[in-house]
Image (cartoon, grey):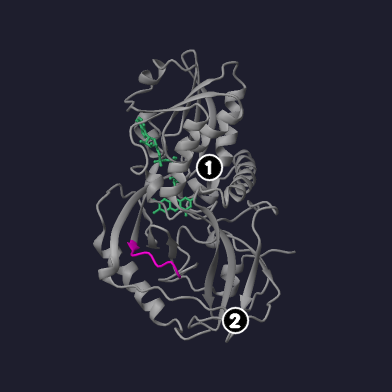
């Protein structure tokens, strides 16, 4: 099917409510089946907030780094800088990093970092015969990865269009195909990976075909291979409970960080790995490790540890409400999880503060109150 930028063409409601930096990213439209969906509204109010979390996305304008280097006699492999797409690409860039490691002769590896990148890299290395030790100064639940919205958003906040290169595009395409498949295979395995319907309320169905890709973030040669993504369904008037005329539906992969990261740590240990709490101040400290191969998965930590000046924090903040088991869809920047109803999005480039931005929290809360107040409650 010929694909187009669906969001711009169809006028999906973005302002204030839905699809921010970590938005649903792609899909194809399907012919509209006649159906009527009933969705439980979210109870949004200030007194239902149970926590507000802050995390710093590790962004680089030229995209993530996966490459091999040398550190004295050691093979040093970098795998960091995934911006708002660290979950989405994790298993894929972990595989690319493992390919670099396989080029060496040794099969003992130190992985530095215990976020989603470090954990999936450790598992990919183990699958390929490596004896792995993870070293990290912070473990889940205290990593950036724990603070993520965490849906499959492979181009979110990832790269500046004018910094794309054919080589990086190739790495990305390989990574996204691998990661998409790996995540599908984890569904139902107790890792906190599942499919959920993402609804985008819209006022026009002018374009009923085409592709949604990163909310218009990415321009230039197509980046998402055809094998990644699936069909979008359009709902017409009377078929959905939103205040808009239409709503589109797209199944998306959702990750529950507190379940996923713990499960991956258990997997690493079950396959003979070790996890050691340790901070490294300079690359010299790494050179003293016993493992001949070192994989750097320190995310934003690579700015100080390896002096990567291109890394910039993009502050994100999530407001979490009391869980509602009956809410089984995502819409308008709301994602339900076992540990709470999560509201986003905040994207503040260059802001390295881990303090809660109260104005941003109020804005997110008020947008959600306004949105869910307009949902038809007796719609069935
Ligand atoms: C609000 C928000 C929403 C997001 N939403 C999504 C989304 O929907 N989809 C998606 O794919 N991604 C999303 N992301 C992005 C994703 O969370 C990140 O890309 C990802 O978590 C980065 O993982 P990481 O393992 O590279 O880094 P981290 O999780 O930061 O882990 C780094 C590890 O390295 C360790 N470390 C760092 N420096 C040192 C050092 N000097 N010595 C020892 N250890 C060190 C840390 O302690 C930690 O263990 C979101 C992020 C935020 C903040």
Q: Position of residue 150 (x, y in %)?
A: 46, 53
Measured as percent of width and height from the top left, residue 313 is found at 36, 46
Q: Which residues are magenta?
A: 320-326
The answer to whether the residue labelled 1 contacts the one labelled 2, judged by CB atoms less than 8 Å apart, is no
Q: Residue at x 56, y 19 (%)?
A: 107
Residue 48: x percent and y percent?
Answer: 29, 68
**Mark 1 and mark 2: span between their CA atoms?**
36 Å
Q: Is residue 6 left or right of residue 84?
A: right
Q: Which residue is mark 1?
A: 90
| 1 or 2: tag closer to the N-terminus | 2
Q: Which mark is residue 297?
A: none
Tell me if 282 is positioned left or right of 10 in this view: left
Residue 177 vertical placement versus 347 (above, below)? above
| Above or below: residue 75 compared with residue 163 | above
Q: Residue at x 65, y 75 (%)?
A: 207
Res. 105 image quadrant: top right
Circle 2 residue: 36
Please tell me whether mark 1 sits on a helix, a strand or a loop: helix
| Cβ of mark 1 under 8 A from ligand 1 | yes
Q: Main secondary structure of the magenta part?
A: loop
| Ligand 1 location (quadrant) | top left
Question: Is residue 342 in the magenta section?
Answer: no
């Amino acid at each position: 099917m010929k694909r187009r930028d669906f969001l711009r063409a169809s006028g999906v409601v973005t302002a204030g409510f839905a699809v921010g930096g970590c938005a649903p990213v792609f899909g194809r439209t399907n012919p509209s089946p006649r159906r009527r969906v009933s969705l439980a509204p979210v109870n949004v109010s200030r007194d239902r907030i149970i926590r507000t979390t802050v995390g710093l996305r590790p962004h680089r304008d030229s995209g993530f780094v996966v490459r091999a280097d040398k550190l004295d006699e050691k093979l040093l492999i970098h795998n960091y800088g995934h911006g708002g797409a660290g979950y989405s690409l994790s298993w894929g860039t972990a595989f690319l990093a493992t390919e670099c490691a396989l080029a060496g002769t040794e099969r003992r590896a130190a992985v530095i970092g215990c976020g989603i990148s470090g954990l999936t890299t450790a598992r990919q290395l183990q699958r390929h015969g490596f004896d792995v030790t993870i070293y990290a100064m912070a473990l889940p639940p205290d990593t950036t990865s724990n603070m993520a919205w965490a849906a499959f958003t492979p181009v979110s906040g990832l790269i500046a269009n004018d910094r794309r290169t054919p080589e990086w595009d190739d790495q990305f395409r390989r990574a996204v195909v691998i990661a998409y498949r790996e995540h599908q295979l984890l569904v139902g395995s107790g890792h906190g990976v599942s499919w959920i319907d993402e609804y985008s309320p819209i006022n026009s169905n002018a374009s009923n075909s085409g592709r949604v890709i990163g909310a218009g973030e990415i321009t230039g040669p197509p980046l998402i291979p055809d094998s990644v993504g699936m069909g979008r369904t359009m709902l017409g008037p009377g078929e959905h409970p939103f205040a808009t005329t239409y709503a589109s539906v797209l199944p998306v992969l959702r990750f529950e960080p507190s379940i996923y990261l713990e499960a991956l740590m258990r997997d690493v240990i079950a396959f003979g790995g070790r996890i050691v709490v340790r901070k490294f101040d300079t690359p010299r400290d790494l050179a003293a490790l016993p493992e001949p191969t070192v994989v750097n998965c320190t995310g934003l930590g690579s700015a100080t540890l390896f002096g990567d000046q291109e890394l910039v924090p993009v502050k994100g903040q999530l407001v979490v409400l009391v869980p509602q088991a009956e809410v089984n869809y995502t819409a308008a920047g709301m994602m339900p999880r076992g540990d709470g109803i999560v509201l986003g999005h905040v994207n503040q480039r260059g802001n390295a503060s881990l303090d809660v931005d109260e104005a941003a929290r109020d804005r997110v809360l008020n947008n959600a109150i306004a949105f869910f107040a307009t949902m038809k409650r007796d719609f069935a």
